[in-house]
Amino acid sequence: MNENEQNELIHKVIGAAMRVHSEIGYGMREKTYERALIVELEHLGIPYSQQSRYPVVYRDVKVDEYIPDLEIEDILVVDTKVIETIADYELGQMLSYLRITKKTIGLIINFKHPSLQWRKVTLNP
């Protein structure tokens, strides 16, 4: 997928999140928004996977696992949040998701406030 197609996908996902935010409102649980966003992605015909599990391995031993909220078209990791602001912790978490999933683009979407907030995160391989 080229950069223009990636930007178009990100634009569609943000638009879908805006529709969810507009319909449901702000301040509900993260899982509510994740599930509603899935309904909107299905309506738009955008392929996704939800809650895929990725092992974290240290010295050939599985020590943990990462479970990103959504992966879209096998290139974009989406993390839904209900937090005051997207801060360094969320950026670090997304960078970890990108490293573990071997993807390069992430999108953090925050539904807590009257205006939807989002942040694109890229991992340079």
Image (tube, rainbow, N blue to C red):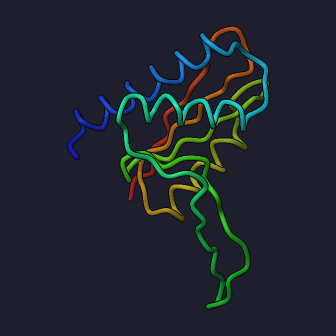
**Which residue is rendered at x = 44% and y = 29% of the image?**
13
Give the tally of numbered discs: 0
**Which residue is rendered at x = 60% and y = 10% of the image?**
22
Please tell me which residue lies in front, 43 or 3: 43
Answer above or below: position of 39 versus 50: above
Horizontal side, residue 71 vs residue 91: left or right: left
**Which residue is rendered at x = 23% and y = 47% of the image?**
1
Answer above or below: position of 64 versus 37: below
- Residue 32, given in percent of the width and then of the height, sits at 71, 32
- Residue 71, given in percent of the width and then of the height, sits at 48, 49
Answer above or below: position of 124 versus 65: above
- Residue 103, given in percent of the width and then of the height, sits at 42, 56
- Residue 59, given in percent of the width and then of the height, sits at 64, 90
The residue positioned farthest toward the bottom in the image shown: 60
**Which residue is rendered at x = 77% and y = 29% of the image?**
83
Horizontal side, residue 7 vs residue 27: left or right: left
In the picture, the quarter occupied by the C terminus is bottom left
Horizontal side, residue 113 vs residue 91: left or right: right
